[in-house]
Amino acid sequence: MKQIGIVGAGIMASGMAQNFLRHSYKVTLWNRSPEHLKPLLESGATKAETPGELTKRCDIVIECVSDDEASKSVWLGKQGIVEAATSEKVLVASSSLSLDWIDELVALCSNKGLKFMDMPLTGSRAGAENGTLRLLIGANESVLNSVRSDLEAISEKIYLFGKPGMGMRFKLVLNTLIGIHMNAAAQARDVATKAGIDPVLFAHALVDGNMGPISPATKLVLESVNWPEGHVNFAVQWLEKDLRYAKKMAEAYGIDFDLLNDTQKDYADYKNAGYGAADVTSISKWF
C-alpha cells in the first residue's frame, strides 16, 4: 500500500488525511503550524519536519494549502517538495491556485521529469470529512490511473479535464459560478426582505419545489438563515481569493466578465470589513 503525504492541515487537508487513515494508509503530515496536526497525529498519522522530508518518505504527495504564496513556500526551495521529489513519486496540487502559478509549477515538474497532477477539490467540509469529495484533475491519464484506486479513499467521483493545469482552470470557473449564485441569492433576499417578505418564508418557498433559479449554491444562502452563528463550511477569504484568480484568468483570455467582477468586489469589500473568516453564505449580511 502506498504511503501518503499531505502538506497542509486545513478543513480539506485534514478530511483527506482522516479518510486515508480510515482506509489503512500510512499518512505523513506537514503543516506550517504544527499544533494543528495534533488530532491527526492522535489518529495515527506521523509528522515530517519539512515538506521535503515528507516527500522523501511518501509515494503520493498532496499539497493543500491556502493560496499561491503558501503553495510556493512548500513546493520551492531546498526544503521543498520539488527538490526532494524523484520520478517514481506522484505530486499533487490540491489548493485553488492562480493560472500563473499552476502553469509555472507544471512546467517546473515537467522539466525535472516529475509526475505531477493538479487536483483541486469540491464538496466542502462534509465531502472532505465523509470521503465524498469530487476531484477536479488535470493530468496525464497514465499518471492518474496509477493512483486512481488510492484517490477513491477520499472521493466519490473523479473528473479528468485534460493535461496538468486543466483541473485548476475548471475549479476557478466553478467557483466563479458558485460566487455569482450566492451573491445573487443574497441580494435577492435583501430585496424581498425590504419589500416586506419574511426572509424565512422567502427561502422556504424558493427551496420547496422547482422554481427555476435555485441551484445548490443559492439554496445554501437561503437556508443559512437557520444556521448557528459561527458555522463555516468555506470562508469568505478563500472564495474571494479564488474569484480574484478567476478574474485574472478571464482577463488573460480577453474576457470582461462583469458578473464575476461585481461579485469579486462584493466579497472583497465584505472580507475587508472584517468578515474574512465567516462562511461564504453570510454575504447576505453585507446588503
Image (spheres, rainbow, N blue to C red):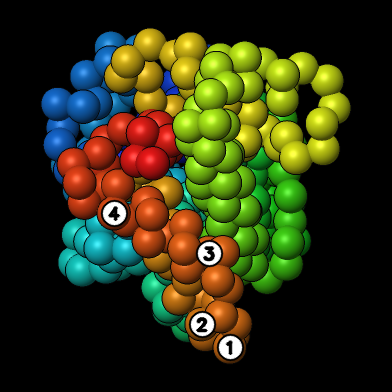
Q: Rate crowding at label 2 as few (under 14), some (14 to 19) or many (20 or more) other CA atoms within 10 Å.
A: few
Q: Cβ–Cβ below 8 Å for labels 2 and 1? A: yes
* Residue at the (68%, 70%) spot, across then down: 163
Tag 4's secondary structure?
helix
Task: State the residue position of label 1.
Answer: 254
Q: Quadrant of the N terminus?
A: top right
Q: Residue at x 30, y 47 (%)?
A: 270
- Mark whose residue sits in front, 1 or 3: 3
Which mark identifies residue 53?
none
Residue 44 lies, with reference to residue 216, above or below; the image says above
For numbered disc 1, what is the local secondary structure?
loop
Q: Look at the numbered disc 3 and give the secondary structure of its residue.
A: helix
Q: Which mark is residue 260?
A: 3
User: Disc 2 to disc 4, how far (Cα)?
Assistant: 21 Å
Depicted 287 relative to depicted 281: above or below: below
Q: Is residue 61 left or right of residue 147?
A: left
User: Which residue corresponds to mark 2?
Assistant: 251
